[in-house]
């Protein structure tokens, strides 16, 4: 699934092509995409509106139109936005025609992607307040903030990082990469890190996401740029998907385990397992 760096990559490529243009026509071919609205209702709300800004919040692309009309788009598992593909690819769910005859399509083989209409700034804010924590690049995302969120939590730190209501945008790839960079074992209880480890984790989350953005995202699945090209961050993974390979830092073999139901990659030397002290 595209995570923050993948969605940010698409946003950066798409924004200069769409901002300032009018959405002449939107054609929603799959009613699942616009649920609970019927395709015709969403088409009516957006057609003829000027795209003022293309933003991002967590893993959402946020299309902001004139009149405080917003569309929160989520790509989920296999969604992609393609600019003027010729011929038109399979699995097109939405077609967008913009002024200047610019043409975009949203493809999505597994059909989990969504587009939700939000009317007004308050509706936009409430939508994200209910779903997402701070952006990792927000200056309020500090070690203290992280420590406060984690206080008393016994869930593994990896599961904690994946919870979008706490930190927005981190998924399975970047959680593994950040925990490795921080030297923290993914199974360590979230509330049981030292002050120094929260600080290292904060820095590592930002560093892993920044490296992903610099490499224009990771394509280990269907993730594609708007011109169909793949990202390259998968070639720079430190631990993710590297089971059986040597750790670049210490040479130990990287192992795979399951944490919170997700495949998880770890160097048990750089990220020592947590051994709780017992009273005897
Ligand atoms: Zn190592």
Image (cartoon, rainbow, N blue to C red):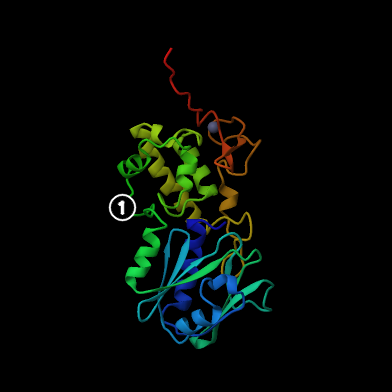
Viewer-nearest residue: 18 or 120? 120
Drawn side of residue 81 relative to residue 15, left or right: right
Q: Vertically, is 168 above or below 196? A: below
Task: Tell me what residue is drawn at x 45 percent, y 45 percent.
Answer: 161
Which image quadrant for residue 125? Answer: bottom left
Residue 12, image x and y in percent?
46, 67
Task: Tell me what residue is drawn at x 37 percent, y 81 percent.
Answer: 66
Residue 231, image x and y in percent?
58, 59
The local crowd at label 1, few if under 14, some if 14 to 19, many if 20 or more residues have their Cα within 10 Å, is: few
How many marks overall? 1
Q: Quadrant of ligand 1?
A: top right
Which image quadrant for residue 260? Answer: top right
Q: Quadrant of the C terminus?
A: top left
Q: Residue furthest top?
A: 280
Residue receiving disc 1: 139
Q: Vertically, is 71 above or below 268? A: below
Residue 120, image x and y in percent?
34, 74
Q: Quadrant of the N terminus?
A: bottom right
Task: Tell me what residue is drawn at x 59 percent, y 74 percent.
Answer: 31
Q: Secondary structure at mark 1?
A: loop
Task: Tell me what residue is drawn at x 56 percent, y 48 percent.
Answer: 236
């Amino acid at each position: 699934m595209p995570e923050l760096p993948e969605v940010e990559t698409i946003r950066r490529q798409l924004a200069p092509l769409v901002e300032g243009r009018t959405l002449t026509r939107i054609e929603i071919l799959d009613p699942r995409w616009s649920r609970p609205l019927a395709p015709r209702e969403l088409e009516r709300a957006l057609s003829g509106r000027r795209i003022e800004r293309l933003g991002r919040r967590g893993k959402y692309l946020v299309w902001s139109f004139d009149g405080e009309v917003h569309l929160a788009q989520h790509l989920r598992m296999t969604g992609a936005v393609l600019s003027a593909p010729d011929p038109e690819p399979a699995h097109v769910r939405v077609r967008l025609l913009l002024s200047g005859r610019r043409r975009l399509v949203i493809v999505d083989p597994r059909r989990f992607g969504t587009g939700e209409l939000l009317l007004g700034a308050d509706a936009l804010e409430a939508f994200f307040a209910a779903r997402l924590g701070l952006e990792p690049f927000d200056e309020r995302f500090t070690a203290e903030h992280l420590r406060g969120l984690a206080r008393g939590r016994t869930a593994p730190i990896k599961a904690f990082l994946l919870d979008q209501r706490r930190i927005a945008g981190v998924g399975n790839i970047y959680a593994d990469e950040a925990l490795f960079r921080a030297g923290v074992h993914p199974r360590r209880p979230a509330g049981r890190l030292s002050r120094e480890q929260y600080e290292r984790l904060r820095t590592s989350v930002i560093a892993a996401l920044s490296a992903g953005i610099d490499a224009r995202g990771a394509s280990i699945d269907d993730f594609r740029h708007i011109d169909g090209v793949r990202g390259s961050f998968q070639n720079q993974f430190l631990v993710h998907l590297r089971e059986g390979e040597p750790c670049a830092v210490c040479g130990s073999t990287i192992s795979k385990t399951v944490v919170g139901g997700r495949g998880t990659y770890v160097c048990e030397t750089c990220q020592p397992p947590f051994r709780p002290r017992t009273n005897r």
